[in-house]
Amino acid sequence: MSSSTLAPPPATTPAQRVSTGGKMTRRIVAALLAITVLLTVAYAGVSTYVATQMVYTAPQTITLSPADYGLPYQSVAFKSREDNITLRGWFIPGIRGVGLFTTERTIIVVPGGQQNRTDIYGGALSVSVDLARNGYAVLVYDPRGTGDSPVAPFSMGYFEQRDVLGAVDFLRTGLLPYPDLGRPGAIGVWGISTGATSALLAAAQEPALRAVVSDTAATNVVPLLQQQVLERSGLPAFVMPGAFAAARVLYGIDYYAVRPVDVVARLAPRPVFFIHGDHDPWLPASNLTSLVKAAESAPNAHVQSWIVPGVVDHAQTFHTMPVEYMDRVLAFFAASLGPGHTQ
Amino acid sequence: MDMSSTQQPDERMAMLAPDSVRVGVFAGMAPLVLLILSVTTTFVMSAIALSVTGSVGFMTRQTLVIAVVSLGALISLVIYTIMCIRALRQVRQWQHLGATKAATGALWTLALVALLTVSPVLVALMWPAPQW
């Protein structure tokens, strides 16, 4: 046989022939892998972006001071509890009479979320001024991330409660702004919106807070945060679980843990006064009902509540009825802490 | 042409591990296992970064943590992609060599891996709306 005769083509076994079906299946699985990883990466990216927006606070300039209301005050600085963030604020002595001051009963005023110490929107400075004029010393400060306090992520009270606790520590052991007046004999707290949430969470773990006024607090913050984020961004609701998870990973914020309704029972027997607007568009008045019910579940609870009529914007209870508002708050503190000024 | 080349595929088959579903499953699981390991490492590193930077300013902490998470996510994605490609190439080789059980096992496992990879999105879709 001629050596030039070509050998027959090598025989191929059936196994060596890849079926069309097998190749198609492999391609389908490859496409599935690609699509799913792209979906997950996109979701993670959007969630991360939403989380960064949730914690961001736009800077606000402080444009007013107690001096604009004819009140003396001292600028103070103190450290938050646990993480030692330096917070800045004002200490306003209570007015007992002409030229007479007192710090015997001091109220910590906690502004609303992402607001500085003046919180013109919620009325923190106005409330502070009225308290001081009625004989209560006031410590009002910039929560972390606002005003002159350091930049920090906004956590709806998860971290801000440490600021309230730091204020308590300052009043009890810090450098006295008015040494001649001595330390406060009794400390109360007034908070609005996120400030109220922070006040409730702090008071639940700090017995030195002898009385609490909680204005427009939430039972838990996740529904509020979700509502606000979705309204402003137009994103679908399913991005929020990822955003909350991203906030936990990136900032250590557990929004699901911010639940004043779970801790208000611990305030007893200390008095607590819940206030809420009847038509608050961000937080329905049912939040107050739930908080009151939870607080009253404790033995020896002392709970007051007031749903302010005619409130159509968030946390506008003071601005809607300022005279009656302050009458009720002053009466509450007088009953809880004693009158602000000496008789 | 070297006549011995016709022997190689069969010889290779003979040298392969037994054609079993379990072999295929192991190959298909590799991308997921490594993904879980790299993502877990990323979470651990970010937690460490948060804890050791407690005393520095927020902006510094945020920058560091975002850098750690971003790098970890990128590495995880690269590892996952490479492992998926390797697994699919292995499947193709098995299919060429007639190891259909291993190839089928790997393909089903890879499909399951894809489902698990997208599960966070599916969970988010089914997450109950928060209540007051």
Image: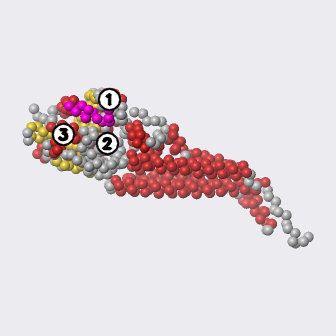
Q: Nearer the viewer, residue A82 or A58?
A: A58
- How far apart marks 2 and 1 lie (CA) works out to 20 Å
Residue at the spot of label 3: A129
Residue A193, image x and y in percent?
A: 31, 38
Residue B80, image x and y in percent?
A: 56, 54
Image height of A342 relative to B102, above or below: above
Q: What chain does mark 1 sit on?
A: A
Residue at the spot of label 1: A278
Q: What is the three-letter code of the residue carrying label 1?
A: Asp
Residue A216, image x and y in percent?
A: 31, 34
Residue at the spot of label 2: A113
Earlier-in-chain disc, 2 versus 3: 2
**In what element is the residue under mark 2?**
loop
Earlier-in-chain disc, 2 versus 1: 2
Q: What is the three-letter code of the residue carrying label 3?
A: Val
**In what element is the residue under mark 3?**
helix
Specify whether residue A183 is in view.
no
Residue A227, image x and y in percent?
A: 41, 38
Task: State whether discs 2 and 1 lie on one chain.
Answer: yes
Q: Quadrant of the N terminus of chain A?
A: bottom right
Q: Nearer the viewer, residue B80 or A4?
A: A4
Q: Please give the name of the residue rendered at 29% of the width and 29% of the height, measured from the top-left corner.
A: A310
Which quadrant of the figure has residue A300? top left
- How far apart marks 2 and 3 lie (CA) works out to 20 Å
Range of the magenta residues? A312-323
